[in-house]
Amino acid sequence: MQKVFRYQHSQISYHLYGNGPNVLVAFHGYNQTGEEYHEFGKVLGHYFIIIAIDFFWHGKSKWLEERDFTDHDMKSILSGIAAAEGLSQKRFSVCSFSMGARLARALVRNFAHRIDDFIMLSPPTFAFNRFLNFTTNNYFGLSIFKYFTYTPDALRNWVERLYRFKLMNRSVYVFTSKFVGKQERIEKVFKTWYAQRKLRTNFKTFAQTLNNNGVRVILIVGKKDHITPPHQMIKFVRKLNNRRIFLLQKKHELATPETLRVLSKLYSTEKI
């Protein structure tokens, strides 16, 4: 079921799956929607009611405010959706895939005292987070980003050169080639990244927040994932007090059979 929540001048679409006694707030990756969590509802619906939120310019979500999107907005939106669904008093868990990790961390920062589990599926690397901050918060980086956004042929040429000189691996090249060279696609990337620019994470402080509130972190990553290589994030999660780490035979994908099997067993009486 898809619904729309009105927030000030903006609108946020979200999808509901399952009817379990617990709540899971989920965020999708780039060029996806919350509908990607449909399969999760099939295997976790007995345990969770899943609220899968569409990020702006994905699904029917639109950010129409004349200011940056912030942690406070993320908190207010979740509070509003929870109230609309009669779930305001419940504790909840958070799940994110890829790009969605940035929004999920903003939610965890604001509701850490009410969160049981934080499930990270193929989260971005630290290098990508630094790159996103540079291209959206640094004047020089933002100027370059805007230039490539409105001259997509130039970006395509650079991607081709990086791949030709083996400075970009094939998986990243194939992924990037899906949207470079086409105006509407690169503009969507720009608007998506730019909308998240204020959602910055100090990972040292974030780790303390997770530990201090007893949040269990569940990291599920792929051995074959060349888009967001898992090694650094595995190292980060291993330092947390309450964590589970699963390294699976998968690529940069959300609802794989391997991922669903792990989650199904994790939220049942069966031990992994």
Image: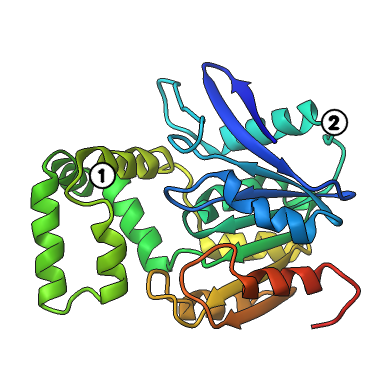
- Residue 83: percent from left, percent from top: 79, 28
- Residue drawn at point x = 14 percent, y = 53 percent: 155
Position of the C terminus by quadrant: bottom right
- Residue drawn at point x = 91 percent, y = 74 percent: 269
State the residue position of label 2: 86
Seen in the picture, residue 203 relative to 35 is either above or below; the reply is below
- Near mark 2 (Cα within 10 A), the count class, few <14, some 14-19 or many ≥20, is few
Amino acid type, callout 2:
Gly
Give the distance between the C-alpha atoms of the residues marked 2 and 1, in whole angstroms: 38 Å
Residue 155 circle label? none
Residue 16 lies in what quarter of the image?
A: top right
Residue nearer the viewer, 221 or 35: 35
State the residue position of label 1: 186
Residue nearer the viewer, 61 or 68: 61
Residue nearer the viewer, 3 or 192: 3
13 left or right of 132 in image: right
Say whether marks 2 and 1 touch (CB < 8 Å).
no
- Residue drawn at point x = 11 percent, y = 75 percent: 164
80 left or right of 18 in image: left
Seen in the picture, residue 160 relative to 155 is either above or below; the reply is below
The answer to whether residue 213 is visible is no
Amino acid type, callout 1:
Ile
Q: Secondary structure at mark 1?
A: helix
32 left or right of 248 in image: left
Q: Secondary structure at mark 2?
A: loop
